Amino acid sequence: MFDRIYRAGVLGVAGRKPVEHLVRSRAWSVAKRFVAGEEMDTAIAAVKELAADGVLGNLDLLGEFVNSPETANVFAGQVLALQARAAEAGVRPYVSVKLSSVGQGMTIDGPGSTAGTDLGLSNARRIVGRARELGGHVCLDMEDHSRVDVTLQQFRTLLSEFGAEHVGTVLQSYLYRSEADRNGLDDLRPSLRIVKGAYLEPESVAMPAKSDVDAAYRRLVYSHLKAGNYTNIATHDPLIIDDVKMFVLSHDIPKSRFEFQMLYGIRRDLQKKLAAEGFTVRAYIPYGRDWYAYFSRRIAERPANVMFVLRGMLKG
Ligand code: FDA
């Protein structure tokens, strides 16, 4: 309950324009702990740096709730450019995309056979198509609960067109519906990233108690692993990570069927340690000028982070 109140407080304050303005102008020195940089090349350099520790990268161009088809198309173009640049630099173009940022919910109109198609789906097709050409992968991030139905529906379409090697998505354990969603996707053998969930959601759709979210997290991971599907275990929770290690050992699940994923700047020590133990580990590496919403969610996850921000801002 405290977690929810804290999260609501931080995200509520962070959503105010004067606060955003102040944090954007004063807190970059703090934000850069969680964000690799504002430019594409700094993010690619971060992937190479992590590779020295045996950790793989998942590149994420930040940008959310893009509100016009033109900006959505520009954003999609930037993701396509990122994929190409990564491949040129010898980095596998493994990227994450929020469908809202490429036009989900906007309709393509005008003449032509694509009229009426969702712009997010059409742009995602281009991005996943490019991933297939370049031997890459695209994970469709999961946003707030109002987008889950449409994201899963578009994921099904893309998966049937491009295959699980090139496209995956995310389920959030705080949502009551996620267990049924996972069961419903099983026949497609999908690659899923399991997370706890980072948005402020009403109690009608999301579990308010952290202990329930953690228990649901374990259930989702275990059932996806048991079904033999590729599982991306995206958490920094050391207790859950230890339990998963025991689970795979006792169920003879090979290391090639799952990976651990963590966020850039969080528990790098643990990322390195797991990689040294022979597990596949991937860090989610966000970059771009639109870092504020992502940064606010990271602060809302952990009370100690507020002090970290305030101290950083006072230092300037
Ligand atoms: P939990 O919150 O219980 O934290 C466990 C421990 O991790 C903490 O005690 C602390 O040590 C450390 N930790 C966690 N968060 C921290 C922070 N912000 N700063 C410092 N330390 C921290 N969510 C979503 O809704 N949609 C999505 O698509 C994704 N995608 C995604 C990808 C990847 C690779 C990861 C790791 C996470 C996401 N998330 C996400 C975010 C996710 O939902 C969740 O909010 C965070 O991972 C924090 O939850 P933990 O599982 O780490 O556990």
Image: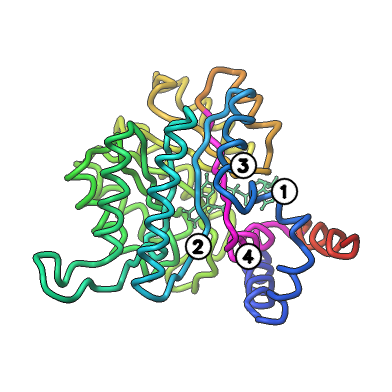
In the rendered image, which residue does mark 3 sit on? 236
Where 39 sits versus 252, above or below?
below
Quick one: quadrant of the N terminus?
bottom right
Residue 52 coordinates in the image, percent (x, y): 63, 23
Where 163 sits versus 156, above or below?
above
Q: Earlier in the sequence, mark 1 or mark 2?
A: 1
Element at label 2: loop
User: Which numbered disc covers residue 292?
Assistant: 4
Q: Is mark 4 within 8 Å of ligand 1?
A: no
Q: Which of 106/84 is in front?
A: 84
Amino acid residing under circle 4 = Tyr
Q: Identify the residue at the far right of this view.
A: 315
Q: Identify the residue at the far left of this view.
A: 113
Residue at image location 19% in from the left, 41% down from the top: 187
Q: Which of 247/10 is in front?
A: 10
Q: Which of 246/262 is in front?
A: 262
Amino acid residing under circle 3 = His
Q: Is mark 3 within 8 Å of ligand 1?
A: yes
Q: Earlier in the sequence, mark 1 or mark 3?
A: 1
Q: Are discs 4 and 1 less than 8 Å apart at CB?
A: no
Q: Residues within 10 Å of mark 4 (few under 14, many from 20)?
A: many
> From which residue to which does the magenta span run?
281-303
Residue 217 coordinates in the image, percent (x, y): 48, 47
Q: Mark 3 and mark 2: span between their CA atoms?
A: 24 Å
Residue 275 coordinates in the image, percent (x, y): 58, 23
Where 112 sits versus 253, above or below?
below
Residue at image location 57% in from the left, 55% down from the top: 288
In the rendered image, which residue does mark 1 sit on? 33
Q: Mark 1 and mark 2: span between their CA atoms?
A: 18 Å
Residue 6 coordinates in the image, percent (x, y): 69, 68
